[in-house]
């Protein structure tokens, strides 16, 4: 698609000096008061292709300044009117899950299994950020992750490559729309390519070991999908894979990304990652870092001034071929042309109605929350119930927004107590931490009809460089739960978390569990509306909830083993560890509703198709009838998994291949139809070749990954 800009990019390139060309490959750190004049001068000389509108790595965890639109317009004016070739700059910022209006963290949005809503959310996000000079956001984050100790799991889509691919497509489309050059759209950046989510032990920035078989089947699908949906920039990841830093890997950045995935945009490094090649032990000098990264296919250097300080000399002394520089510059120019920056370099005011964005954030938050437990229908609560509310998240505001919130404001975020008070028609007694003031808390609990505990983890325990070794809540929260349970009253836990927590010893002491996540600006209202049944919960876990942190990694799409010790599906669980049973506490795809759904009458129009039919575009048409047999209208995510029991390579015991979220009114029965074709029934070999093999395919359909086997298909 970028090829239509080739000619114009070449014309621009032909008039540029070497210095200016290198300038295009340079992304400058955020201008701050101390260096404003220097920055302007660099822009004037054509030494800056892009500006990173964030201060410091781990921007999501550091306090950031607000954007001054006039300042960025003035910088752009200098680039366009005073620099030698007048090439506009591209401004990038980490707008990860919201701008001023904050939507749920991406892991929570994924839990909605509602890709239309995710797309709509990112449309609002793009509008708000584009209105403040941001052309380009470093999202979606597509690092498949099977280790919730990793703080960055909250930025991604969880443990499943298929869901990852669907969400990737929704985010890219939401941000870019049909025409990214419109002023209310932003360029997306698929990151972190590749394998960052496999950091050993969940420790941030650590090494990863990933076989090519796993790379193609687990880690690449989301990137393949983002690229297909129109992502024209990719950020390389900090980590190494099998001893090769991605930053300097021609294999990953060129052979696979461009050669196999067909990516035609540009690659930006992660923050300071080029010079980090020295620490990673593959380069001795900064110049070596440049040589390695640029030759590998890394086009834009984020923030570390490595290219701008070294490339000129490297070209002049013949170490680097000018053609490599030209190619990188052309890729960047083409993306700038694609974004329409040459026609429309400045930020103009965009008309928008922020209340609509808040409504969208509320809808997204409501669909993201997951009801994990509801014994004896304790929920929904009656509006006039007398509630004793305790726990550290009662008055918490900042954490509800989640990590990577640069422009959202904690003080504008309603806390849980306030939302509960607004929604309730009964009396509420509240304290931010019951354990510290047990006398009055205990009395209030005795007085109340029901105890609600606002629990969770701080936003600052999640995100970049925020790994934890124990995915749990604090000991005093566990103590509070035990004390509440001891009162003999019904106890409801509302969890404001970024990652799944190990539930053993926690959920047993609660009658109901709502997983409310860090769901952004509208977290508190959405959680309360679920509590009272104004919203019927419909989220599903996009990650397995383990019993204990020591059971990690624990993920649903595991392969079988020769000896029967695969406990996920209940096969000989006692044989895994002698001291504990590592079955999931809540499996992937799990989530309850206030109503009940029954699955019946699964059918495939044809149960056998030949490989040639499939190659020619035929597909298996499968349907199942889902009945709402409960007392509420509700939304169900119908999930279809497959298993290939005999293949040339071992295949996962379950692989999600389709899902549909649909509203089913009480008493209604809906026929849900799926289609499985050539692209759904195969897998990738280690060399990246996609194969569909003859034989049987088992199909499981249900409301989570422990679904029943319903149909067996045959490929002849
Ligand atoms: C993070 C990226 C982010 C970049 C710019 C890095 O530290 O890994 O995800 O986009 O900083 O803020």
Image (tube, rainbow, N blue to C red):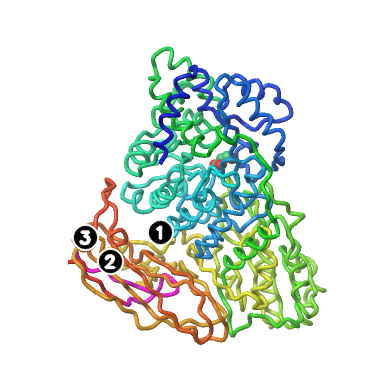
Disc 2 secondary structure class: loop
Range shown magenta: 694-710
- Which residue in the structure is indicated by mark 3? 693
**Viewer-proximal residue, 73 or 498?**
73
Distance Cα–Cα, label 3 vs label 2: 15 Å
Residue at the image point whose x is 49% and y is 38% from the top: 338
- Which residue in the structure is indicated by mark 1? 162
- Which sits earlier in the primary sequence, circle 2 or circle 1? 1
Image coordinates for residue 568, horizontal then vertical, percent: 40, 68
The residue positioned farthest toward the top in the image shown: 317
Looking at mark 3, is its residue's CB closer than 8 Å to ligand 1? no
Distance Cα–Cα, label 2 vs label 1: 18 Å
Residue at the image point whose x is 59% and y is 56% from the top: 105
Determine whether label 3 and label 1 are within 8 Å by CB: no
Image coordinates for residue 43, horizontal then vertical, percent: 62, 24
Disc 1 secondary structure class: helix
Examine the rendered structure and indicate whether residue 503 appears above or below residue 322: below
| Crowd rating for badge 3 (residues with CA inside 10 Å; few <14, some 14–19, many 20+) | some
Foreground disc of the pair 3, 2: 2
Examine the rendered structure and indicate whether residue 248 appears above or below residue 362: above
Q: Is residue 553 visible?
A: no
Residue at the image point whose x is 49% and y is 17% from the top: 17
Give the main secondary structure of the magenta stretch. Answer: strand
Left or right: 134, with 590 as reference point: right
Residue 657: which disc? none
Q: Is residue 492 visible?
A: yes
Distance Cα–Cα, label 3 vs label 1: 19 Å
């Amino acid at each position: 698609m970028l090829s239509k800009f080739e000619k114009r990019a070449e014309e621009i390139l032909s008039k540029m000096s070497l210095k200016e060309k290198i300038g295009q490959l340079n992304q400058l750190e955020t201008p701050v008061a101390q260096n404003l004049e220097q920055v302007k001068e660099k822009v004037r000389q054509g030494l800056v292709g892009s500006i990173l509108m964030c201060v410091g790595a781990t921007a999501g965890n550091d306090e950031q300044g607000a954007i001054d639109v006039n300042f960025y317009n003035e910088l752009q004016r200098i680039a366009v009117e005073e620099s030698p070739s007048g090439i506009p700059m591209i401004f990038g910022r980490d707008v990860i899950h919201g701008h001023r209006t904050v939507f749920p963290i991406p892991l929570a949005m994924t839990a909605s299994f509602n890709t239309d809503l995710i797309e709509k959310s990112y449309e609002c996000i793009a509008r708000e950020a584009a209105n403040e000079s941001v052309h380009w956001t470093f999202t979606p984050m597509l690092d498949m992750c099977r280790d919730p100790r990793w703080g960055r799991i909250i930025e991604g889509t969880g443990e499943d490559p298929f869901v990852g691919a669907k969400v990737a497509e929704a985010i890219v489309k939401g941000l870019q729309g049909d025409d990214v050059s419109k002023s209310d759209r932003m360029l997306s950046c698929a990151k972190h390519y590749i394998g960052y989510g496999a950091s050993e032990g969940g420790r941030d920035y650590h090494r990863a070991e990933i076989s090519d078989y796993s790379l193609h089947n687990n880690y690449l699908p989301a990137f393949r999908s983002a690229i297909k949906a129109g992502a024209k920039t990719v950020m390389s990841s900090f980590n190494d894979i099998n001893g090769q830093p991605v930053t300097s890997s021609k294999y990953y950045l060129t052979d696979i990304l461009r050669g196999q995935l067909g990516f035609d945009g540009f690659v930006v490094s992660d923050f300071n990652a080029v010079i980090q090649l020295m620490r990673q032990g593959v380069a001795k000098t900064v110049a070596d870092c440049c040589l390695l990264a640029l030759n590998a296919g890394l086009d834009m250097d984020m923030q570390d001034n490595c290219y701008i300080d070294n490339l000129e000399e490297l070209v002049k002394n013949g170490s680097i071929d000018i053609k490599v520089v030209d190619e990188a510059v052309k890729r960047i120019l083409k993306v700038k042309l694609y974004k329409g920056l040459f026609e429309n370099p400045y930020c103009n005011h965009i008309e928008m109605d922020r209340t609509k964005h808040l409504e969208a954030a509320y809808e997204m938050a409501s669909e993201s929350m997951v009801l994990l437990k509801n014994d004896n229908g304790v929920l929904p609560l009656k509006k006039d119930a007398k509630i004793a509310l305790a726990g550290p998240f009662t008055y918490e505001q900042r954490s509800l927004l989640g990590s990577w919130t640069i422009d959202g404001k904690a003080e504008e975020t309603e806390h849980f107590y306030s939302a509960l008070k607004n929604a309730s028609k009964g009396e509420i007694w509240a304290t931010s931490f019951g354990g510290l003031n047990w006398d009055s808390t205990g009395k209030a609990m005795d007085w109340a009809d029901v105890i609600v505990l606002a629990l969770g983890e701080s936003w600052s325990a999640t995100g970049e460089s925020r790994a934890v070794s124990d995915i749990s809540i604090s000991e005093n929260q566990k103590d509070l739960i035990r004390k509440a349970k001891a009162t003999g009253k019904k106890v409801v836990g509302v969890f404001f978390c970024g990652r799944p927590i190990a539930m053993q010893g926690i959920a047993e002491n609660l009658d109901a569990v709502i997983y409310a996540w860090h769901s952004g600006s509208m977290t508190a209202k959405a959680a309360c509306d679920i509590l009272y049944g104004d919203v019927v919960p419909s989220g599903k876990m996009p990650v397995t909830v383990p019993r204990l942190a020591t059971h990690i990694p624990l993920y649903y799409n595991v392969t079988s083993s020769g000896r029967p010790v695969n406990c996920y599906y209940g096969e000989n669980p006692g044989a895994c560890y002698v001291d504990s049973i590592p079955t999931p506490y809540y499996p992937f795809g799990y989530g309850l509703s206030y109503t009940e759904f029954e699955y019946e009458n699964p059918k495939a129009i044809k149960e056998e198709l030949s490989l040639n039919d499939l190659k020619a575009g035929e597909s298996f048409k499968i349907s199942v009838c889902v009945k709402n047999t409960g007392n509420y209208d509700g939304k169900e995510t119908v999930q279809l998994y497959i298993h290939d029991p005999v293949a040339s390579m071992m295949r996962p015991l379950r692989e999600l291949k389709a899902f549909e979220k649909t509203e089913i009114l009480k008493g209604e029965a809906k026929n849900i139809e799926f289609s499985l074709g050539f692209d759904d029934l195969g897998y990738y070999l280690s060399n990246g070749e996609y194969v569909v093999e003859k034989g049987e395919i088992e199909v499981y359909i249900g409301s989570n990954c422990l679904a029943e086997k319903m149909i067996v298909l045959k490929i002849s």
